[in-house]
Amino acid sequence: MDNGYKIGAIDGKPDKATGAALADFRNRMHFPPTAGNVELFETLEREAKKKIAPAGYTVCNDTREVTLVALAQNEHGKAVSRGWWTVQPGACARALTVPLATDAVFVSAQKRNGAVLVGGSQRFCTTASAFEIQGAGNCAARGYAETGFNTTDTRGKAGYVAHLTANGIAP
């Protein structure tokens, strides 16, 4: 359904509508005759993710290393930063689970050794361990580190999926 097909009831039983949808999808994706269900389901999921984003903010780690992610946003006129979510290679983490209500979400990501993967000019307070920090100013005076975050435009979107690569956030 997320790929735009009308299917029958989801009851585990085969039906003509679902069979026709899968045949059309295989044809549209130019699957070779030897392609199996593993390739089919991976492609179905990948294509659906291009079209829809779940409510909230999801971070997918497309690198080969474990990545630590922090997010920040302005909530009711005040900056709030939160972290660190651990995202395994090839996996996704849904960091914010409610529909987005801000024009931007700021993201910072690093490797386990602390090497910056995603940073930026927006500065927010962080710590080395799990945190939720109100306010973005006077980080050092309050005992926090100041970290650069990249801006993701979420204006008008209920959900957003950010894909982290070895070169930062994928466009």
Image (tube, rainbow, N blue to C red):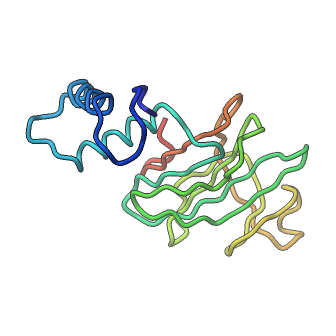
* In the depicted structure, whether residue 39 falls above or below residue 140: above
Image spot of residue 42 (x, y percent): 31, 46
Q: Position of residue 144 (x, y in %)?
A: 79, 69
Depth order, front residue of 29/90: 29
Counting the numbered discs, the total is: 0
Instruction: Quadrant for the N terminus, please.
Output: top left
- In the shown orientation, is residue 110 left or right of residue 167? right
Q: Is residue 56 left or right of residue 89?
A: right
Left/right of residue 53 with respect to residue 21 in the rendered view:
right
Where is residue 80? Give x, y as percent.
81, 55
Question: Residue at 58% across / 42% down in the picture?
Answer: 54
Q: Is residue 79 above or below residue 138?
A: above
Above or below, 57 against 67 in this view is above
**Which residue is pictured at 30% across the width and 35% down the height?**
15
Please give the name of the residue rendered at 32% of the width and 28% of the height, measured from the top-left corner. Answer: 17
Residue 147 picture quarter? bottom right
Q: Is residue 104 left or right of residue 142?
A: left
Figure check: 14 above or below 19: below
| Residue 159 position by quadrant | top right
Residue at figure coordinates x 78%, y 65% from the top left: 132
Out of 5 and 125, give the one closest to the viewer.
5
Of 18 and 96, which appears nearest the observer?
A: 18
In the rendered image, residue 112, in percent from the top left (x then y), is placed at 51, 71
